[in-house]
Amino acid sequence: MSKVSITFLGGAETVTGSRFLVESDEAKVLIDAGLFQGLKQLRLKNWDEFPVDTSTIDAVVLTHAHLDHCGYLPLLVRQGYRNPVYLTSNTAKLADVVMKDSARIQVEDAKYASKKGYSKHDSPKPLYTEDDVDKTLTKFKETEFRVKTQVAKNTFITLFPAGHILGAAFVMLEIGGEKLLFTGDLGRNQHPILVAPDPYPDGEISALITESTYGARVHESPSSVFTDAINKTINRGGSILIPAFAVDRTEVILMKLRELMDTQQIPRVPVFVDSPMALTSLKHYRSAIASGDTEIRPDFIRQFANEDPFGPDTLQEMKTVEDSMKLNNPKNSCIIVSASGMGTGGRVVHHLKQMLPNPLHSVLLVGYQAVGTRGHALENGAEKIKMHGQLVDVKASIVKIEGFSVHADGSELIQWFGKGKKPNQIFLVHGEIESAEIFAQRLEIELKWAPVIPVPMKKYEIIQNPDKSLSDFSI
Ligand SMILES: [Zn+2]
């Protein structure tokens, strides 16, 4: 029997840089290839040489198109990865957008840093360019949901709808006779566009590798805080800036704004989507909703009477940089939705720089803010934040909004896998250490499970599953 091991190359004791290497005697599979984001010491890790010879990896599987799951792929390819990247068709479309945007931001930031001379490096370089992304796209191998696919010798994957963002999957990996279940980022039952995740699979599972981003939290329902903050700001003549992840969060926010305007809970002010990536993502969401073809598999997308449920009629798409600059310091009340969601890059940084010093405006934080990001500093009451080498005063009101998360919280995760058989091993990943520890305690108390919080870069042997029958592993 083949020995199977897993090494947590990223996404361990942190929420970013998801990279899990699974090895048997016959195959090596990497689940996700995410970028590290947030604290500088984490971001610097993106520059490290990949710890394994990438040409020896047989397959990469992507759970979904968020940057912390797919943003490292171009570097993997640049370092010699030659084999397919397995993913759903919607993840392929969105990962294309996300990686290209990441490349563009890095190239722009490197240029800006060298022009302004605030970089500590003599000639700042981007991590990767659009060329690297184009090479990566040629490796994509689209895989249908719920279809078992062979990816290497005695190695199979099945992707299941995860209800997190368009195309997102949780992954069953069967390798060397063991079954490993990766939750990726698991969604919630109440996503306004996607249906609930598929159920936790039946049968024996050797190892469950689960996210724990919100393991310590219980999500509140979207509250009136969002509506109140918008109304208060408009009443005092200010504008609202919503930093939002371009993929999925923008769509969810637009649907909410439309609903609030249609029910006259907020005034019909102009809404600007100011992020090229968000606009492309919006196009893919619209086409997934509008499409009746089988490739889109309508069983994981909710049905809408309206083909375009996103825009209030005041929605304006800011396509060019000139469009974006017109929004600087808006005179009349409006709502600007812009990426990135944690204020780490993209057009939102310019809006923050313009709007933060003005007490009339508000910044609504609607998403997860990783430690070390500007969003995290704002969330924690910073009076000044650093942008493009300058300190900017924070006078605008900063409002943290709960309820828009598309991650299952601790209770939702427990409910999801609590109905299944206890896996032989449980690893908690994709969570800050405190969150993972609290979630571990809950699993011990509520399910009598004994999870491990894996140490980054450490290799763990998968305990052999004594009950399995070999016939499970033929295709
Ligand atoms: Zn995600």
Image: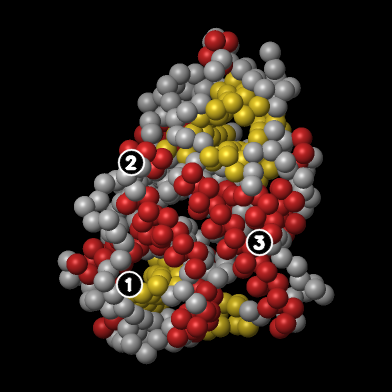
Q: Residue furthest bottom?
A: 331
Label 2: element kind: helix
Relative to residue 427, is residue 329 drawn left or right?
Answer: left
In space, the residues marked 2 and 1 are separated at their CA atoms by 26 Å
Relative to residue 396, is residue 142 drawn left or right?
Answer: right
Q: Amino acid at mark 1?
A: Leu
Identify the residue shown where x is 32% and y is 44%.
292
- Pick the front one: 127 or 181: 127
**Pointer 1: what residue?**
315
**Pointer 3: what residue?**
130
Q: Residues within 10 Å of mark 1 (few under 14, many from 20)?
A: some
Mark 3 touching mark 2, by CB under 8 A? no
**Pointer 2: what residue?**
298
Q: Quadrant of the C terminus?
A: top right
Q: Amino acid at mark 2?
A: Pro
Of the image marks 3 and 1, the number of the one nearer the N terminus: 3
Estimate the x, y position of residue 317 in percent, counting from the top left. Answer: 40, 72
- Pick the front one: 402 or 292: 292
In space, the residues marked 3 and 2 are separated at their CA atoms by 32 Å
